[in-house]
Image (cartoon, helix red, strand yellow):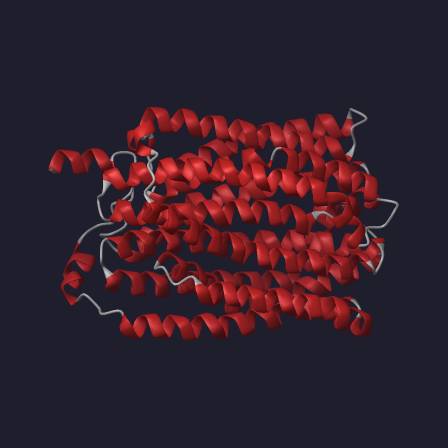
Amino acid sequence: MKTAKMNLRKNAGNMTDGAIMSCLLAFAFPILIGNIFQQLYNVVDTAVIGNVLGDNALASIGAVSPIYNLVIGFANGITNGFAVVIARAFGADKEDEIRKSVAMSFVLTAIISVVFTIGSLLLLRPLLVFLETPVTIIDDTYRYLVIILAFSVATMFYNMYAGMLRAIGNSRAPLYFLIVAMIINVILDIILVKYTPLGVAGAAVATVIAQIVSVILCIVYIYKKCPMFIFRPKDVVKDWALIKELLATGISMGLMIVVVSIGSVALQRGVNSLGEQTIAAHTAARKIDDIFMLPLSSITMAASTFVGQNFGAGKMDRVKKGIMCSILIDCVWSTFALLCSVFGSELMVQLLSGTKDPEVLKWSTTYIRTNLPFFYVLSILVVLRSSLQSVGRKIVPVIGSIVELICKFAAVIVIVPLCGYIGICFLEPVIWILSAILVCVDYMCFAKVCRPNHCEEEVIQSQPCTVSNS
């Protein structure tokens, strides 16, 4: 039994023992670096296109941002949901359950990615028209998105494999693969955008090639280092209870992100109606906003894995303390983000986009200075929302996302015509506050019925963190 357990833990990380804060930080840091590299896929596209092709081309990328985020968000949501189930099985030391979960995750990811790709390609042109994408940029926007969506299966499978590795506490391997992919992406971006007639489409081709490389690297690593993930045909069984749990967890997390992204797509329609300068300003501001969100999302992913493993192991004390530690870390980062928004907004916009247009600078800095002070609220929201999903409480996080969707549709119909872009700047902080109230109430209900395991206290205080990412 001891040998089997040791084999199960090889090339993985146990988060069910050790000092909680150090476990979270050790696990989250590689995720943060990886998220930075993944975000740089899109940021490099923006920087190269803005500096080489100009503001109109930058606007064409900005017009697709919510749709691109929907694709990435859906992939992350579904596959992270599958990873939560794997994390619980890993925390409980059930290798057969891990292997079956991996097998069914692979099958479900393949089916979902094919259906999603076909559906999104069929709806793309009508969606761009619905969003009132300006006629001067709609063709570039369409060409860029067709390439990205046609190969979204690569995005799905990379996120699936990376989620599986993180579920067992290995957050470094996905980082290494992203570093290699990012280098390829930067080189191809410069070559294809600057030195070929592909223009905006060249940036999409570069991103797709880099994502395919990262998938290949994941597969090679898993076959060499993670035998527990190598499933056999007999592992693909009609275990309806497992399939139901995978789908329920994956779809609820995917749906939560998709609903939010649909709201952002609808909101983009309002932005597009305000003209190309506003689109460019919103694009630059959102990129910077997204960069500052990376540490929050990294800690959130660490909290999700931590909570999943400890919930599977039945260590409820560690579940609660891990959630509180995660919120604390995010609040520290939010203070740094607040200082940057006050003193460096305009400089960051200029460095990212290359723009000198005073109207673009005015509205992009307004957006940044309005949103970043509310990161304290967002910290509570994202950690609790993800952690509640990890312990099987799926309904309230989705309801919170629906509230966000309703608010964004209301903004397009009412706020944008009345207030213009300033209304969009204040919209998300209001949504974060409403959604945070919902998840806080649900977490208090969970904490009330969750009995602490006081016998775990001495173990938590005395043992070192055992996270290993080899």
Which residue appears at 18% of the width and 65% of the height? 453
Identify the residue at image location x=31%, y=33%: 235
Picture quadrant of residue 204: top right
Quarter of the image where the C terminus is located = top left
- The residue depicted at 48 percent of the width and 66 percent of the height is 381
Residue sitting nearer the eye, 341 or 273:
273
Q: In this orientation, which residue lies closer to the viewer: 466 or 78?
A: 78
- Please give the count of numbered marks on the rendered protein: 0
- Name, please, the residue furthest toward the left: 1
Q: Position of residue 413 (x, y in %)?
A: 76, 69
Residue 129, above or below 34 = below
Tell me where residue 290 appears, x and y as whole percent.
60, 53
Q: Is residue 303 above or below residue 141?
A: below
Residue 283, visible in the rendered structure? yes
Name the spot of residue 257 as percent of width and height, x first. 55, 55
Front position in the image: 183 or 7 = 7
Answer with left or right where residue 393 lies relative to residue 272: left
Left or right: 169 with respect to 257? Answer: left
Assign the N terminus to one quadrant of the image. top left
- Residue sitting at 48 percent across and 26 percent down? 216
Horizontal relation, residue 210 to residue 253: left or right = right
The reply, left or right, for residue 147 in relation to residue 403 is right
- Determine which quarter of the picture holds residue 444: bottom left
Q: Is residue 104 above or below residue 225?
A: below
Asked whether the viewer can see residue 232, the reply is no
Q: Position of residue 50 (x, y in %)?
A: 77, 42
